[in-house]
Image (cartoon, coloured by chain):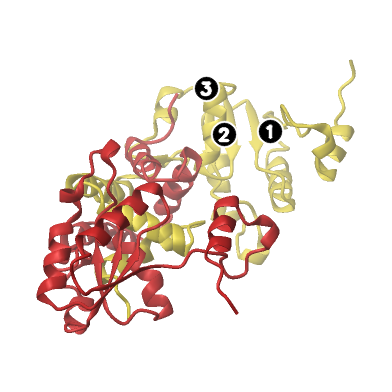
Chain colours: A red, B yellow
């Protein structure tokens, strides 16, 4: 006999639908919710609704924002460098380290013919238009390290080859704090190929 | 600069407040929510509200239910055996294995003077009342294996010593499928003490 009330089963199902949450964790989270104060859970529910209602893509850079034009685009308008990332959350480590003071542009993916993602799905024309209109002088590609990311980077590079825009991509090599003996083959290959003279 | 919109930060906070969910997982879950269809997220929010609004404790056995009296209490009224557990979710393994066909009673905890939990917080008088009124003949204690659980079991046993109720607790020993070499000391001690003649 199923002894769990229907509304509890439904809530367990919601948690189990989240990525990386199994049935056991989902049940634990749902029982935890039952132990919370009602207004606490109402705030959780409101924040869920708020997030999907208010958050949208910035029309200039396609980063997530809940205002008309995102804060970065507003505060840094006039900046001459732009960093191109795959998805909105990729901006976080740049801002956390404070390494990039310029604009961002979220491609929304990388070109992947097998998944049906072509240049037109990626706002590429808008990137070029923005570079021209705002007189961008430097473009930093930060697209991950898959073959699809590499070919997307190559395509962006070609689209801009008749312009004066300085183009670069992030360095690849050994990350901070990693033990050399555990570094994987591809990382080691790239770190060796990209070795820097002293 | 914080590049994440306020409503996204709020949602990350909600997920991070759940037990066992760290900041990184919370961020991943919140971004996942943004990728969902709006009505999908509205259903999630409704299920949260529903769970805390509709689910309450059964007035007879204190298990979670969303109807007046829980299904077990209604369907098995007249049963003569009762299984006493600490919390509502402890009922699940009994029903999954189908080993117990009788009633349940959820204590709501175990006696723990240091945490301020005494017999009066645990519905103990209601358990005794129910046993008397419904003519319960057998009581199975299934209270976990902490010292607090042991002393709670002892107290329940004493409360019923002048009655004819048959009292037992779950057997302790080696669980199914476990490798003997990894069995912990306490489990081994209890399995040895409780050895059964062939």
Asked whether B185 or A172 is in front, the reply is A172
Q: Residues within 10 Å of mark 3 (few under 14, many from 20)?
A: some
User: Mark 1 or mark 2: which comes first in sequence?
Assistant: 2
Which chain does the numbered disc 2 sit on? B
Residue labelled with disc 1: B163
Disc 1 to disc 2: CB gap under 8 Å: yes
In this view, the residue in front, A56 or A81, is A81
Residue at x 54% of width, y 45% of height: B87
Residue A120 in the image: x percent, y percent?
15, 49
Image quadrant in which the C terminus of chain A is located: bottom right
Label 3: which residue? B79
Residue at image position (72%, 36%) is B162
Number of other residues with Cα within 10 Å of mark 1, as a class: few under 14, some 14 to 19, many 20 or more: few
Q: Residue at x 24, y 67 (%)?
A: A105
The residue located at (58%, 45%) in the rendering is: B86
Q: Earlier in the sequence, mark 3 or mark 2?
A: 3
Q: Which residue is mark 2?
A: B131
Dot 3 or dot 1: first in sequence order is 3
* Callout 2: SS: helix
- Is label 3 or label 2 in front? 3
């Amino acid at each position: 006999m199923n002894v769990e009330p229907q509304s509890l089963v439904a809530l367990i199902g919601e948690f189990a639908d989240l990525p990386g949450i199994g049935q056991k964790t989902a049940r634990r989270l749902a029982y935890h919710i039952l132990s919370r104060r009602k207004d606490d859970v109402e705030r959780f529910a409101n924040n869920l609704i708020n997030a999907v209602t208010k958050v949208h893509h910035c029309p200039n850079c396609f980063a997530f924002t809940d205002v008309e034009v995102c804060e970065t685009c507003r505060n840094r308008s006039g900046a001459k460098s732009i960093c191109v990332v795959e998805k909105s959350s990729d901006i976080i480590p740049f801002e956390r380290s404070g390494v990039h003071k310029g604009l961002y542009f979220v491609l929304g993916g990388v070109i992947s013919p097998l998944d049906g993602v072509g240049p037109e799905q990626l706002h590429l024309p808008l990137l070029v238009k923005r570079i021209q209109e705002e007189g961008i002088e430097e473009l930093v590609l930060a697209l991950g390290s898959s073959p699809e990311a590499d070919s997307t980077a190559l395509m962006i590079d070609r689209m801009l080859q008749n312009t004066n825009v300085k183009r670069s991509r992030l360095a690849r090599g050994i990350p901070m704090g990693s033990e050399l003996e555990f570094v994987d083959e591809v990382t080691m290959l790239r770190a060796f190929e990209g070795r820097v003279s002293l």
